Image (cartoon, rainbow, N blue to C red):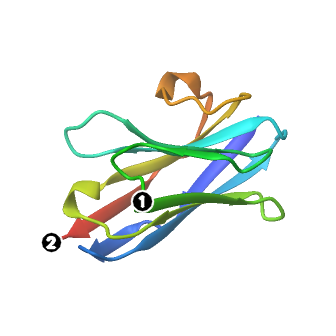
């Protein structure tokens, strides 16, 4: 079993920044892919980006590329989502997910393990 716990959400003004963290515990292997998703009010769940635990290679959705950055700290077993230049349309519940995979899936149904999510609200 893999347990994921997100933290760092909150309210920020447009143009501001936030850093989310996803603490990973339980059975983990180097071949895990970690991803961040978000779901805004009235919207479908959206893949934001992901990182391979083994080599920290990343992929990003076009909607956040250049503004968001994903990294991982092996010693702390934590994945981070750094969000800059936030806009009201970034308001959503942000969740991290994990899956044993040699690549980074972009579909939510490819991930077996999920955190509880953390709310990010961007005010205009």
Task: Return the mark for residue 66.
Answer: 1
Residue 12 x/y as whole percent: 31, 75
Residue under circle 2? 124
Residue 71 x/y as whole percent: 64, 59
In the rendered image, the quadrant that contains the C terminus is: bottom left
Q: CA distance from mark 1 to mark 2?
A: 21 Å
Left or right of 14? Residue 117 is right
Left or right of 102? Residue 91 is left
Residue in the image at 20% along x and 62% along y: 88
In the rendered image, the quadrant that contains the N terminus is: top right
Residue 104 x/y as whole percent: 62, 33
Asked which secondary structure carries label 2, the reply is loop
Looking at the image, residue 106 lies above or below residue 81:
above
- Of 9 and 110, nearer the camera is 110
Q: Earlier in the sequence, mark 1 or mark 2?
A: 1
Looking at the image, residue 41 lies above or below residue 102:
below
Residue in the image at 42% along x and 59% along y: 66
Looking at the image, residue 43 lies above or below residue 107:
below
């Amino acid at each position: 079993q893999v347990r994921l716990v997100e933290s760092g959400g909150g309210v920020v003004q447009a143009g501001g920044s936030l850093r989310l963290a996803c603490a990973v515990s339980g059975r983990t292997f180097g071949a895990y892919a970690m991803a961040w998703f978000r779901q805004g009010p009235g919207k479908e769940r959206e893949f934001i980006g992901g990182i391979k635990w083994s080599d920290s290679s990343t992929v990003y959705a076009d909607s956040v590329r250049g503004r968001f950055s994903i990294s991982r700290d092996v010693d702390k077993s934590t994945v981070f989502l750094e969000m800059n230049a936030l806009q009201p349309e970034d308001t959503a519940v942000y969740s991290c997910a994990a899956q044993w995979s040699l690549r980074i899936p972009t579909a939510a149904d490819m991930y077996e393990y999920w955190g509880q999510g953390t709310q990010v609200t961007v005010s205009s």
